[in-house]
Image (spheres, grey):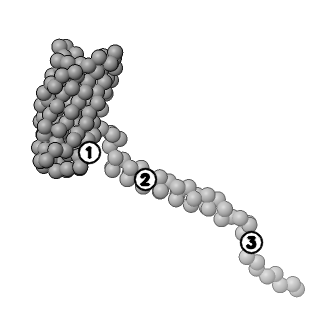
Amino acid sequence: MAIAMAQKPSSPRGRWIPWLFVGGFAVVIAVNTTLIVYASSTFSGLVVEHPYKKGLEYNQTKAQLEAQARLGWRYEVSAVPAADAVMIEMRWVDAGKTPLDGLALDGELQRPVENLPPLRISFEAVGAGRYRSQVQLPKQGAWDLHLTARRGSQEFSAAERLLIR
């Protein structure tokens, strides 16, 4: 008589492959969920506050720059240290290179690398489109000059970086 031996049923080869796909997708879903939660909790999506208002201001600034370009005004600025002050001189010309006299210049100097209060400066007309201002600066170095030139209803705004040594 033959004795039948009990054999274990053999499992088909590759039975674990579907579970590998399930595990891979689980890892991808877990990583994506973690990144989505982290990204949405750390960045609001806004680059600037009040974007609508900034957009309107951009359009106004663009219109002002276009109006300034139509004026054709040009200027040169120089800053010469003198003893305990600085002499800032500007020369203004129009589109035809004619000196611009009769401008009302308002200016402000700001220190870009420190939190110092801005210095208001006023220019006096010297003639032939030249204007001067003598300013006592607390420190040498880089200063930003923000100015507005007006003549009647015409207005021109500009900014220049001055290096005072």
Q: Nearer the viewer, mark 1 or mark 3?
A: 1
Q: Residue at x 15, y 22 (%)?
A: 104
In the rendered image, the vertical position of residue 56 relative to residue 14, given as above or below: above
Amino acid type at circle 2 is Leu
Checking the image for residue 117, the label placed there is none
Distance between the alpha carbons at the discs numbered 3 and 2: 43 Å
Q: Where does residue 30 sit, x and y in percent of width and height?
A: 47, 56
Amino acid type at circle 3 is Ser
**Which residue in the structure is indicated by mark 3?**
10
Quadrant location of the N terminus in the rendered image: bottom right
Q: Where does residue 80 sit, x and y in percent of width and height?
A: 21, 41
Q: Are marks 1 and 3 in contact (CB under 8 Å)?
A: no
Amino acid type at circle 1 is Leu
Checking the image for residue 35, the label placed there is 2
Distance between the alpha carbons at the discs numbered 2 and 1: 46 Å
Is residue 131 shown to the viewer in this render? yes
Q: Are marks 3 and 2 in contact (CB under 8 Å)?
A: no
Is residue 148 shown to the viewer in this render? no
